[in-house]
Amino acid sequence: MKFTRIENSKKLDRIILYLMTLVLFASTLSAQDSLKETPATANRWNPSIGTKLPTDLASHFKTPSKWKNQYGTYRSPLIKEDGTFVSTNQEWQIQRTKIKDWWMQKLGAWPPIITKPTLNILKTVDRGNHFEHEVSFLWTPTESTVGYLLIPKSDEKKAAVVTVFYEPETAIGQGKPNRDFAIQLTNRGFITLSIGTTEATAAQTYGIYHPSINNATVAPLSMLAYAAANAWHVLASLEEVDPNRIGIVGHSFGGKWAMFASCLFENYACAAWSDPGIVFDESRPSVNYWEPWYLGYHPPPWRKRGLITPQNPANGVYNELRSGNHDLHLLHALMAPRPFLVSGGSEDPPNRWEALNHTIEINDLLGFQNRVGMTNRPLHDPNPESNEVIYRFFEHFLADQ
């Protein structure tokens, strides 16, 4: 599947698409009836859910006037291979499948997902309002991981969130400040599962390499997404968890991880991505998808870490994506109509709405509103204010509606 850039000057195409959508909407569009979600999310997302946002969230799900109807140089995911526009829900399902297949072909095929996981409890600590379980499980066919499962003390089925980072301790409050997503969400009544690449981080290889670091056939960032798919099944297997209400969140490295996981694995009901760099940007040192542990994998010895230069070029599938003018808005499109929030910092400033508007356009076609949000702060680090929006996002979209 080949995509190229579309220029801003081609506004007539967008006007035509808009008019076609208005005409065809009443007779051909039935988002609630025909969306082909996976079994875990079937029947959950319909146009009425989440349309009215609470006051403290609403402003973050409205494109600022400066960026409204601005699409940048990103080619619309709604443009089909023959150059025509997707104009119905049914056509979007076909287009979505093609986009998903294209990504999986580029990134490498996943091993079989572990749908019947075995969860081993290594240690349990009573934290007062919740139990903290140190756990292990297979997150690839050959590799287990150790993380933390936090379960509030109540009997009803609960929503749950997977948190991802360099190591699982940070999210439970044992690391840098304002990255303790797991403990904060558990204090609000969520079951959380905190996972991270502890051993790879210690070795400064960070990712997951399948089948080996010397011969990886799947982009490491995609393998992280695969591991998160297996983590979803761990949570879904618990009798305390409602499998229809599982989200994922991460910051920076974890933001990239959460973004790829939620986009490539449809069972995640919603997601929050904290300043991952939601599009490629080679001027930003933390939007570093070219590094070998993300999308720039090549067999060791690896390039020197840092910005791309003629003396220190990028490698791997990253180069293929860039040379083909492909960008990550084509990944975001796979979220529609599931809600997501970008908690933007230095790497995701307000002009990222140009990319997000493409997913909003898809949701408009499908009949869904208020599914794409963004906050902005000047620094890369999360802060209490930006995190509060993340927590309110999960409280709203994972409510038992």
Image (cartoon, rainbow, N blue to C red):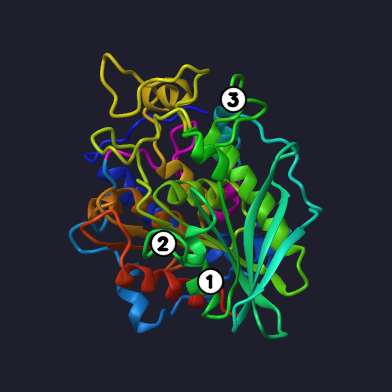
Q: Amino acid at mark 1?
A: Pro
Residue 179, numbered circle: 2
Q: Name the one closer to the observer, 361 or 199.
A: 199
Q: Is there any visible trace of residue 38 in the rendered image?
A: no
Q: Residue at the top extreme?
A: 311
**Residues packed near mark 1 inside 10 Å, few (<14), some (14 to 19) or many (20 plus):** some
Q: Main secondary structure of the magenta part?
A: loop
Image point 43% across, 33% down: which residue?
A: 83
**Residue 235: within the magenta?**
no
**Residue 93: within the magenta?**
yes
Q: Residue at the left extreme?
A: 66
**Residues packed near mark 2 inside 10 Å, few (<14), some (14 to 19) or many (20 plus):** many
Residue 213, numbered circle: 3
Would residue 180 appear left or right of 377 to someone viewing this image? right
> Of the residues under marks 1 and 3, which one precedes in the sequence?
1
- What span is colored magenta in the figure? 73-94
Q: Amino acid at mark 3?
A: Ile
When the figure is inspected, residue 129 is found, relative to residue 193, above or below; the finding is below
State the CA–CA distance, disc 1 to disc 2.
32 Å
Where in the figure is residue 231, as x and y percent of width and height? 66, 54
Query: Mark 1 highlights which residue?
Result: 47
SS of the residue at dot 3? loop
Q: Do tag 1 and tag 3 residues touch (Cβ < 8 Å)?
A: no
State the CA–CA distance, disc 2 to disc 3.
28 Å
Where in the figure is residue 31, as x and y percent of width and height? 58, 63
Q: Amino acid at mark 2?
A: Arg
Where in the figure is residue 46, as x and y percent of width and height? 58, 70
